[in-house]
Image (tube, rainbow, N blue to C red):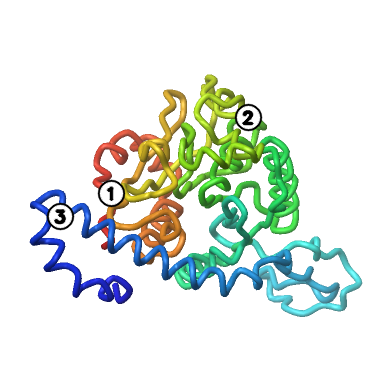
Amino acid sequence: MKVTRAVSPLLPLCQRLLPGRIAGLSLALLKATALEIAILAGHLLLYPTGITPERRPAPTPPGPPTDTGTGTGTGTGTGATPDTTRLPTPTRPPVVLLHGFIDNRSVFVMLRRSLAQHGRQQIESLNYSPLTCDIRTAAELLGRHIEEICERTGRHEVDIVGHSLGGLIARYYVQCLGGDVRVRTLVTLGTPHSGTRVVPLMNAHPIVRQMRPGSGVLDELCQPAPHCRTRFVSFWSDLDQLMEPLETACIEHPDLLVQNVRVSGIGHLALPVHPAVAAGIRQALDAEETEARPAAAQAAAQADGLTVA
């Protein structure tokens, strides 16, 4: 990783000053911090491009019916035609990308490109207002967006990738608002599923209070969910500066089908950007549902995590 090479002159000094394991941890933290700063700088440049809502694909204009394999590739347009307001149905569900707190869809530029290059035909990045003050309200809005996406694409289900707060909003939709009928797989990246204690001064913001341990929202997510059909994959980093404790980004719920994936060597901002994490997300989304459900416990036990730095 080119960004981390900038700190290489400091490595011999750190190794002399710090003993073994502590030195290794400090060096990894130093590399991760340097990468976070670089990603933050790049994201600040891209941020204005993601403020406006994403353009939705235009409906197919009325015209000749589509060739259905009967040898009538063209037509006069006078007979019965399929619903032309829907997009062609791909083989995989649409992917919905949901950003974190005080962010926008620009954070997913790299991940979106990676997914598209590996066969995902329909990817949509949703923005919610930076003034959002309630996870429940944001989850209801997400549900309306997903209904619209399903109607437009002709698909019954979608996959969701949520970064940080976005993952919590998506989980609330799935678990508490019946969204499991629409969401096949939910991937979360650095999401405080059990609440984070970082930056106590941010408690002035109501949505931050909802992300604290013991909040009403998190208590609702701890309630039984015996019939939830969605598969959950949670990526958490051992150097995530915004998760306190770090394991809060894991999902621990007896009724949910969960795989927690540990990522070593990067921080919070790198999770939706790093190519190794993108590869893990693709693998999670591409897992066949019929195979993933029976083997979920085995897959979770065998997941050693990702070392990316």
Q: Which residue is mark 3?
A: 23
**Numbered mark located on residue 176 in the image:** 2
Amino acid under label 2?
A: Cys
Q: Badge 2: few (under 14), some or many (20 or more) residues near its Cα, within 10 Å?
A: some
Q: Is residue 240 left or right of residue 203?
A: left
Location of residue 306 by image quarter: bottom left
Residue 7 at what x, y percent from top left?
25, 71
Pointer 3 and pointer 1: residues touching (CB < 8 Å)?
no
Residue 242: give x, y in percent of width and height. 44, 47
Quadrant of res 133: top right
What is the number of the mark on residue 305? 1
Q: What distance separates the C-alpha of mark 3 from that of mark 2?
A: 44 Å
What amino acid does circle 3 point to?
A: Ala
Residue 73 in the image, given as x and y percentages of width and height: 72, 78
Q: Secondary structure at mark 1?
A: loop
Residue 169 got which mark? none
What distance separates the C-alpha of mark 2 from that of mark 1? 29 Å
**Cα–Cα span, label 3 and label 1:** 22 Å
Residue 281 position within the rendered picture, expressed as x and y whole percent measured from the top left: 42, 56
Quadrant containing the C terminus is: bottom left
